[in-house]
Image: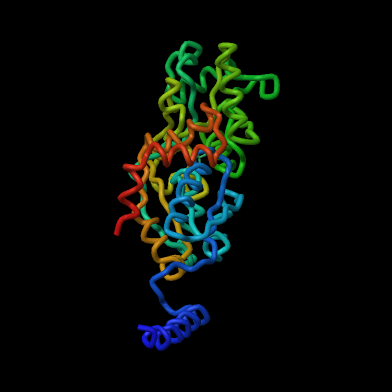
Amino acid sequence: MKFMLRKLLPVALVSMLLAGLSGWAVAADSKDPIILPTHNWSSQIVMSYVVGKLFEKLGDNVEYKPADSQAVYESIRRGDVTVSMEVWQSTFGKSFNEALDKGGIIDAGTHTAKTREEWWYPAYVTEFCPGLPSWEALNACAETFSSPETAPLGRYLDGPADWHGQETKDRIEALKMDYKAVFAGSAAALWAELEAAKKNNKPIVLFNWSPNFTDALYGGDFIEFPEYYEGCRKEDGGDGVCGSPPAGWLKKAAYYQMPKKWPAAYKLLTRIDFDKVQIATMAKLVDIDGLEHEEAADKWLADNEAAWKPWLKD
Ligand code: TMO
């Protein structure tokens, strides 16, 4: 027994050293941190913590890095960021596809959740503008939605400019709408204005998306614009009048070296698949229940073991 140990131990040590030095394919994941980006809306941050904590269950190291939601795909190509958990078709599809074309980033699969990102109003606003949710009706009511800063034009409260600033402006121009887009500084600013408008029974039209906490907690509707098709946007050479995809995809993305460097984590990443309620719940835990993002992730993991346990099994 002793003899065996003495003989085998140095062999094991040498091979570990070699593997470490040369990066030879070994079964275990690298101890370098897997870097997850955090953006400026709640479900994305909570989901990143959820997934980061799952990587940690594999024994991997994880770091979180605040990142611009468009530039992140370039960061992934370069390996400065390792994964992205919420690639939304409407807002980030273009940046993601451009990065795919350049190489260095992997499409790591599509979530079950379908997505919508569009102009939206809470249910009580219907009374202010007969004919909603059509965009023509909304346009005819422009003055009802105007504010001192936009009058006589209607005010459309959009999200932070890094989500899709130019697309909004292109659409308003292409449809000759009597609206002016005002960009919120943060997602929290959108919800603060929504709450204030509701409290004062004031009309409001703002950017929103699904899955989100509003799915369950606010009645409301997305505005119906001319139908989306590939290439309809101005930035893609189209006339720019189209709305967003009504059932867009939500993808995961990874640095192309991830399968080799963190094989176990990559395998887990490809299995991870969130549905609409799971993602809406991540948002709600922060935006309604007031938890910190990481606390929300802990609560989500505790409440959803049945969802994630199978992803960790071999
Ligand atoms: C990317 N977002 C979900 C905020 O539309």
> At x 43% / y 52%, what residue is drawn?
54
Q: Is residue 30 above or below residue 62?
A: below
Q: In this orientation, which residue lies closer to the viewer: 162 or 154? A: 162
> At x 48% / y 63%, what residue is drawn?
255
Residue 251 position within the rendered picture, expressed as x and y whole percent measured from the top left: 41, 50
Residue 64 position within the rendered picture, expressed as x and y whole percent measured from the top left: 57, 52
> At x 60% / y 31%, what residue is drawn?
188
145 lies left or right of 280:
right
Q: Quadrant of the N terminus?
A: bottom left
Q: In this orientation, which residue lies closer to the viewer: 102 or 219? A: 219
Query: How many marks can you see?
Result: 0
> At x 39% / y 63%, what residue is drawn?
264
Residue 219 position within the rendered picture, expressed as x and y whole percent measured from the top left: 42, 20
State whether residue 206 appears in this view.
yes
Residue 260 position within the rendered picture, expressed as x and y whole percent measured from the top left: 42, 70
State whether residue 243 appears in this view.
no
Task: Please identify the residue farthest to the right as the structure is shown.
Answer: 149
Q: Is residue 30 above or below residue 131?
A: below
95 lies left or right of 248:
right
Q: Quadrant of residue 25?
A: bottom left
Task: Please identify the residue farthest to the front as the structure is shown.
Answer: 2
Q: In this orientation, which residue lies closer to the viewer: 124 or 195? A: 195
6 lies left or right of 207:
left
Q: Quadrant of the C terminus?
A: bottom left
Q: Colour scheme used in the picture?
A: rainbow
